[in-house]
Amino acid sequence: MGEIRGDVEVLGISNLLQMLSMNRCDGFLTIQQEGQKKVLHFLSEGIRLVSGARRTNPLGEILIRTGRITRDQLDELLAEQRRTGIPLGELVSTRRILEPSVITSALREQVAEEIYDLFTWTGAKFTFLETRDAPLPADQGPLASVILDANLMSLMIEAARRVDELARIQSLIPDVRLIAERLELPASLDDPSLDRNSIEDILPLVDGERSVGHIIEESLFPKFTVLRTLYGLAQRGVIKIRDRGDGISSPVTVVRRPATAPEDMVAPKGHSVLLLSELPTFRAALGMCLRQSGFTSIEGRLDGDSPETIKQFSADVIVLDVPIETDDGLNLCARLRGMTKIPFIVLSGNASKQAIANALKSGARYVLVKPLREDLLIERISNVLKG
């Protein structure tokens, strides 16, 4: 393959990563945007992050957020890290504060967030050099030893979901330079569609002076989670997003290109799966995943026309992307059960046991919580087909 150069937005980051992965390329992908740079090393066994533009989700923040360590423990460890130069993950491991598997999982989350961050870059350029033609980068970061699985499809599915959600968020928060201002708090913020932990971390940072970008920098949570939380709070009238008084208020249009299947990838004449989701990029990524696994993928919007879509196509399984924490979502599940004998699997962003139990009572055969693992989705569909 030699050397490839180009504009990320012309090809699309999804298509670029997919192309390199599917062709089993061995080399270094450098992506640059306005002084920021990330280098990914594609190997036969997977992908590693040689260097990142910045730590989008530092290890210490992940460990605090998940309740693995306390703030005092982190401060002590960071002080020791500054004295010794030993990476935080290694300190946590040698002190036997956490099991190595926990640290590895957190490091993988870091690498994944760095890659998801690429999907928000605009005007970026890329260069790919095969390993034999590229010198080993000297500025390897602390995550360079972590290798993500060679199968990028699960990563692509989650990235596609985020692209769709970011498009919605940008209608309200078009620029991270805008200011977040707190309004009068409601009596209760007990909303199952909002994450309580992220609210408790982010809401105190909303003071009418910090920009959205500053809140992203200071929060324990990664950029996408902060934006989603601020969007949810603004939708509920808890906060408002305003300009700084210097004209920073006009929307910023960001063009995204979803992943597309290669032209020679034809859906086989096997079992068919009907995908219903209101998120077009997410829907396309799931469809590509199913076709690669030997299924025929039928894709439709999740809206008032969903029942008609179901009647129009003869599918063996239905995959329904629906918010099961709401009555509307559960009612759609119950309606689906009442109008067809086709078994259906529900995808949801809500992980509460009660929401999952309600969806199962409403007729779902399985409930899969996002971020979605490709192998688990295929396994569940196969189980349904086996009866």
Image (cartoon, rainbow, N blue to C red):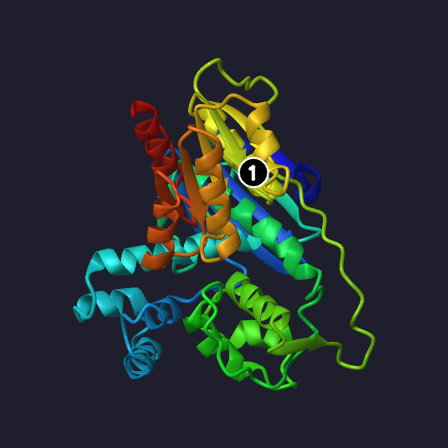
Q: Is residue 385 above or below residue 118?
A: above
Q: Residue shown at 71%/39% (left/top)?
A: 10
Extreme-left residue of the structure: 96
Image spot of residue 275 (x, y percent): 52, 34
Extreme-top residue of the structure: 269
Image spot of residue 148 (x, y percent): 38, 45
Can I make out residue 15 in this image? no
Q: Is residue 145 above or below residue 20?
A: below
Image spot of residue 75 (x, y percent): 33, 82
Of the 4 image quadrants, the one containing the N terminus is: top right
Q: Is residue 74 above or below residue 278?
A: below
Can I make out residue 141 in this image? yes
Of the 4 image quadrants, the one containing the C terminus is: top left
Comparing 298 with 42, the one in front is: 298
Q: Is residue 224 above or below residue 176?
A: above
Image spot of residue 176 (x, y percent): 66, 69
Extreme-front residue of the structure: 338
Comparing 263 with 332, the one in front is: 332
Q: Residue shown at 62%/39% (left/top)?
A: 258
Q: Is residue 12 left or right of residue 297?
A: right
Comparing 190 with 132, the one in front is: 190
Give the quarter of the image for residue 175: bottom right
Amino acid at the residue labelled 1: Arg
Q: Is residue 246 left or right of residue 2?
A: right
What residue did someone put label 1 on? 283
Instruction: Label 1: state its secondary structure.
Output: helix
Q: Residue shown at 75%/77% (left/top)?
A: 243
Q: Is residue 383 left or right of residue 188?
A: left
Comparing 136 with 318, the one in front is: 318
Label 1 crowd (10 A; few <14 / some 14-19 / many >=20): many
